[in-house]
Image (cartoon, rainbow, N blue to C red):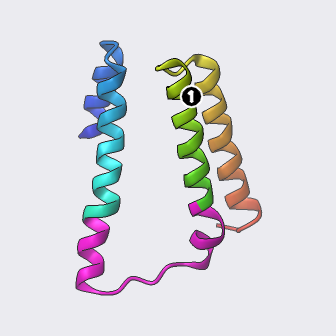
Amino acid sequence: MWALASVIAAFRRHADVAIGNVLGSNIFNLLGILGISALLQPLPVHERILQFDQWVMLGTSLVLLFFLYTGSRLSRLEGGLLLLGYGAYVGLSFTVFGV
């Protein structure tokens, strides 16, 4: 449901609502749902997450923070760079880690 609200907000040129909606949903899913699940039963952490994925998430967060700090909005170039980074992440996931 958050995706529809974010798309509508983006079409209405309310980027702050769209970004806040996506980030808020992801933070809730990560901390809320994962926290409740871990309370019910301990969850194993796959080695790949510790070696690769957490660093990609940290790097992407820092790049996004830099993009938003420098211009207060994402340009097409910055969006393209983020899309290329996602493509590289997916490519590495399939080639290096064989997912």
Task: Report the side of 28 relative to 60 (left or right).
Answer: left
Quadrant of the image occupied by residue 19: top left
- Residue at 61% across, 25% down: 78
Helix, strand or loop for disc 1: helix
Quadrant of the image occupied by residue 34: bottom left
**How many marks do you count on the picture?**
1
Of 37 and 98, nearer the camera is: 37
Q: Taking 3 as reference, is 13 above or below it?
A: above
Q: Where residue 85 appears, x then y in whole percent? A: 66, 41
The answer to whether residue 95 is magenta is: no
Amino acid type at circle 1 is Phe
Task: Report the side of 45 relative to 11 (left or right).
Answer: right
- Residue at 35% across, 60% down: 30
Q: Taking 36 as reference, is 39 above or below it?
A: below
Q: Taking 44 as reference, is 22 above or below it?
A: above
Q: Where residue 91 appears, x then y in whole percent? A: 71, 51
Q: Which residue is mark 1?
A: 67
Quadrant of the image occupied by residue 18: top left
Dot 1: within a 10 Å radius of its alpha carbon, few (fewer than 14), some, or many (20 or more) residues? some
State the quadrant of the C terminus.
Answer: bottom right
- Residue at 51% across, 27% down: 69
Task: Report the side of 28 relative to 67 (left or right).
Answer: left
What kind of secondary structure does the magenta stretch mostly adopt? Answer: helix
Find the magenta span and give its range. 33-54
Q: Where residue 75 appears, x then y in whole percent? A: 56, 17
